[in-house]
Image (tube, rainbow, N blue to C red):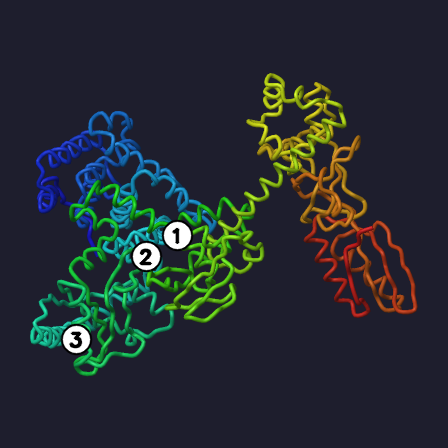
Amino acid sequence: MSKHQKDLTIEKLMDKIKTYITDEKELSIIDRAYKFAFEKHFGQKRLTGEEYIIHPLNVAYILTRISADYETLSAALLHDVVEDCNVSSSEIEKEFGHNIAVLVDGVTKINKLNLSGTTEALINNQRKIIVGLSEDVRVIIIKLADRLNNMQTLFVHSEKKQKATARETLDILTPIADRLGINSIKQDLEEYCLRYLNPSEYYDIVEKLNATKAERDNSVAKMIESVSDLLNKHDIKHEIFGRSKSIYSIYKKLEKGKRFSEIYDLLALRILVDTEQDCYQALGIIHSKFRPKPKRFKDYIAMPKTNMYQSLHTTVFGIDGQLYEIQIRTYEMDRVAEYGIASHWSYKEKGSVKAVMQNEMEQKLQFFRAIMDLKKEQDNPEDFVNTVKKEVFQNTIYVFTPLGDVIELPSGSTPIDFAYKVHTNVGNKATGAIVNSNMVPLDYKLKSDDIVKIITNNNSSGPSREWLNIVRTTQAKNKIKAFFNKANKEENLKKGEDVLSKELRKQKISNDDFFADDKIKKLLSDLKFNSVNELYGNLGSGKISVNAVIDTYLKKEISKEEKILEKATKGSEKQNTNNSLIGVAGIDDIKINLASCCNPVPGDRIVGYVTKGYGVTVHRMVCPNVSRLDERLIEVKWNIDCSKLPTNILVRASNDNNSLIDIISKAANNDIPVRRFNNHHSKEDDAIEMTVLVNNKEQLLKLMNDIKMIPEVTDVERLIK
């Protein structure tokens, strides 16, 4: 784990930078950035008591571990001057150029985000981060280094602050570091998080590792010597060394129920060779002498992880019969394994290094972009969070196209998910699937190593709505929804055009007159639409009535009810602020009535019906009296709980005179007045119809459950007349 360097100086930093940056102009800009930051932060202290400049120096030093370029290092030195020193972005741009100013501005914006909260808030903030990073991926790399240095000095804060920062880091920043493949920073962040979130487990693992260190070092040294001799005999050039196991990864395995002695890769080797061919040759040679443990071999060279990681993993019975995990990779693969997306800094690419990194980020952060797309599609927070949990905490499978290309999918994916992953048109025109040369249904659950071929038909009418219940990936769901949204849009356009045309004939208004340039422009402006198609679409979807359009055209006074409908369907964000029980979006001072047929109470899902001359009548959504209505229905919401609203329940009980007394007693025990009751006798049972006064649905459900516990009672239900 890297340590915070209290005595770090610009001279030490520059010595480290000069090991890979030699351009004098670039070095000069880094030096100027330091002097600028030193001057602006002069006199400021950190909670550790150090001069503030030590923090940006440490952030830049951390970035040298991944060979960051001069612009990133300069921005790291300057990253707090806008937020803490009253320096403007324009001043940074004037002094250091556009690119460095963009990086500093990006880090400043992320620092202003509150990244902690509930699951939904966390996901939303991940989304905000990605939106903020669309211009330059180096912003998040600076942020990761900034957070690592803050974790290194987290001991100065209260325990509450330590845990909150560690949780935020583990939930938001380490997944991004992992997705970008920046392993060297990710592991350090994880271990600091564990130290503050579960200190007893952290120090217990450290103590166990220290207790077995001498023994492990001795065993690993013997194994290194044996494997190295073996590879030398077969003329394979290599480097081999012991690999320390991450404390956090040990903790995760212990958390799953493994014992410390069962963690195979506590004894671990890493072998670096020149070529991919050497990797496989070395693997075969090692297996020829040391027996591999079944089901512990993984080929990440043929099937790389999404963060670009490539390596061969095997676990073998080594010297003294102990298990050793061995990783075999090329030098290039090792560099990518440590630096991930940042590995592009270490060598020259065709074109801009920034452009290459940005392109890689687009691919590697599809995970988060899928969340962004999902949020657009799902307004219900509960559905959103549940779906994100499935997307985020999923197992991954790897399947193949017939040409051998690898496609990564979440476990449980179907051929439809595969089809949309290949291309939108392949998904939209899919009619069947062949997996491993066998025809399978479209809801077939794919498995790793399946070879999948999609059968398409250019004459296909498109996806089925049923597919939304079959597919596993957000990408497929969104593309299916997009297809139907487009189809619905076209249908609404046609419907709106027909409705308007019919009304114009009915009103004896000629098309030429109605669509005259000056008149249609005025009408669209009055209705706040940008085009005739937008007018048609809103007419077709029922968001505006044809009467409102004609009345506006003829300059008639629109009725109060039409105004209510128009405001409500436009979904104004403004919510009425009076203390009325029911809120109608965008509308104050409207008469609201609770429907006597279904008697809604706070907690019920409700809908409003605009009644001419009578305001808005509020029904329960399950009320059959509104199921046939659509044009005049509007969204309404409960504002507050109130005291004692009437609602009706029906209780069925065996013929027993005492049951009514027991029921009324239950109501009294729950502080619920009974306004009236009506007892209907029959040969089979008694049907007791009651009107009770309750505060909310929760109180009503408790009463109904209590009544159900009466031995004579056979059923209790809400009554809708």
Instruction: Give percent across and percent down for residue 164.
Output: 38, 50
- Disc 3 crowd, CA 10 A, few/some/many (<14, 14-19, 20+): few
Q: Are marks 3 and 1 in contact (CB under 8 Å)?
A: no
Q: Kindly report the distance in space between the C-alpha atoms of the residues bearing marks 2 and 1.
A: 10 Å
N-term mark: 3 or 2: 3
User: In this rendering, is residue 81 above or below 511?
Assistant: below
Residue most extreme to the top: 518
Return the residue at label 2.
Answer: 306
Dot 1 corresponds to which residue? Answer: 367
Left or right side of 559 for 284:
left
Q: Amino acid at mark 2?
A: Thr
Q: Of residues 93 and 498, which is closer to you in this image?
A: 498
Packing grade of label 2 (10 A; few <14, some 14-19, many >=20) is: some
Amino acid type assigned to the residue bearing label 1 in the image = Phe
CB under 8 Å between discs 2 and 1? yes
Q: Is residue 39 left or right of residue 624?
A: left
Would you call the spot at circle 1 few (<14 residues within 10 Å), some (14-19), or many (20 or more)? some
Label 3 – label 1 distance at C-alpha: 42 Å
